[in-house]
Every structure is written in structure tokens, then in C-alpha cells.
Image (cartoon, rainbow, N blue to C red):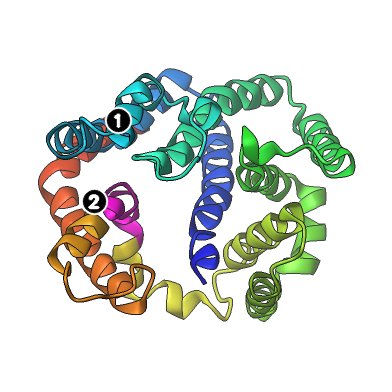
Amino acid sequence: MGSIGAEGVTLFFAISGFLITTLLLREHDRNGIIDLKEFYIRRILRIFPLYYGTLLIYILVVALIEGKNSIGKSFFSNLLYFSTFTSNLFVKLDGRVIFYFAWSVAAEEQFYLIWPPVLKFFVAYKRISVLIFLATVAYVSAIQFGFNVLSVFPSAIFIGALLGLALHSRWSFRLLYLLLGQRWSSIIVAAALFFALIEGSISVYLLHTIFVALVGSCVIREDNFLASTLRMRPVAYIGSISYGMYMLHMLSRNVVLKLLDGFNLNEGGLEVFLLTSITALIVASLSYKRFESVFLKMKKSHSR
């Protein structure tokens, strides 16, 4: 079940690839241009403050508690990669690696660095269809030749971006509407995803494609069967603080384990999971209201 829970980051990548692509395409439709400078300012104001704030907390905690052991020394030797968003390229998971979860943020930042300029180039020359073709060929080639893009670049974010392109094009939208645009499509795809996760032996590309299909089935039409659940205030609120929960969840887990030390609880058990989730929810809420909100207000001034 732990491996299934870890797939939450896959859903995040699928949403991110689709959302960033769609927002940039709509910006071009609305303003006639994709403003990369303003895009990067918005991303920096959203990602950097909490990321580097969390990293600073880790530096202090590791220096105080584990600075003299091999794990602590390894953390400080990897600090260059954590601070430059390159840990997914140079930090390998070999036993316990402090701050390893930052690999996903690093991959996301690399996506922001590469994809928007590529998208701007093809959109400027009205060649979205060409970009869809090239992206599809690259994706199929990765599957055919077994290239493990997860070691460098998450395939879910790539497929999510492809979904954003496809839904923006009239001819490909019509095709996807037939497949994912029915009211019941979201339920069918969610069920397929559930069984794929339980079965556990399907290819990573197919699994990530199903994740992206779920995103597509929820955005093509707003009256899909999952819409009422996704619009619930608790669900929407968790979505708004999800970045904070992700960045702070390991700190929250370690606090829970310290407080429960001596109770002989299974570290992977349900009790630890629930208490960690509650702690991360509280800490992320405080971070969102007292810290991140300052930069989010600045971010709004850079949105057209």
C-alpha cells in the first residue's frame, strides 16, 4: 500500500503538465504572446520561498541531530544538488537519504525551464499540430525502446503536457471528447486506475497514461461524476495547501515518530499515517496562511 500512496506524486505531475500547458496556451490566445519572464516570476514566488525555507529547517535540524553521522554528512554533501534543483539527476536513493523527496520538485523545475520556451516557439509559428506530432513520436519511442524517462524526467508530466496540447487543438479535442468526454468517463478511468494500482505489474507508461486520462476525464466536462466530490470544500482546501503538505510531510512524520517513541508502533502502520497526515495538514495550513500567502499576493501582481 505504501507504493500506491507514493503514486500521489504521479497525479501531481499529470495535473501540472496539463495545467501549465493549458494556462500558457490560453495566455497566448488572450494576449497574443506567452510572457516567459512573468511566468518564471510567478513560479519562483510560488515554489522558492517554501522550498528554501524547508531546506533551511532541514539544514538546522540535521546539523543539530545527525550532523556527525554518515547520513547527516551525506545530506550536506548533497546540499549543492538540493539547492540547485538537480537532486533527481545526482542524488540516488541508497538506504536512508534525507530530503530525497525533493527529486520531484527538481523535476518540476526542470520542466518549467524547458517546456515553456519550446511551447512558445511552436505557438508563435502556429505549429501546435507539429508539436503534438513530435511529442507523440517521442512518447511512443520512449515506450518502444524502453527508455526510463523516470530516471530524469517524469513521464506523467510529459503526457499531461501532451493532453493540454491535444485538448487545445480542435481535431484532437473531438477524438478525446469521444473517449473521455462522457459523464461516466471519470468513473470508468478511476476504476481502471484503481485496478492498475492494485495489480501492480503494468508498465509505468501505461499507468501514467491512465493517470493523465483521469485528469482529462475531469476537465473536459464539468458535470462528470467525480465533480461533486472534487468541489467539496475540504478537498479544495487540501488542494490549495498540497504543496506545503508535500514539502513538510517528512518533518511531520519524524515529529510523530519521536512523540510516539516507546509505543512500539509500526512506522508504516495506519496510526502513524493518520497522525502524520493530520500534523502535515496543520503545519501546511499555518505555512500557507502565515508565510506562503505573502508571496502569493506578490504572485498575483504578475498575472495578466
Nearer to the camera, 147 or 137:
147
Q: Is residue 3 left or right of residue 185?
A: left
- Taking the view exactly as shown, the residue that stands out farthest to the front is 69
For the point 54% across and 35% down, the residue is 24
State the residue in front, 245 or 186. 245
Residue 18, image x, y percentages = 58, 47
Q: Tag 2: residue type?
A: Leu
Residue 234 vertical placement versus 14 (above, below): below
> Where is residue 66 drawn, in percent x and y?
21, 37
User: What span is in magenta?
Assistant: 239-250
Expressed as whole percent of the image width and height from the top left, the position of residue 55 reads 25, 33
Residue under label 1: 48
Which numbered circle lies on residue 251? 2
Horizontal relation, residue 292 to residue 290: left or right: right
Q: Viewed as shown, does residue 36 lie left or right of 187? A: left
**The residue tagged with tag 1: helix, strand or loop?**
helix
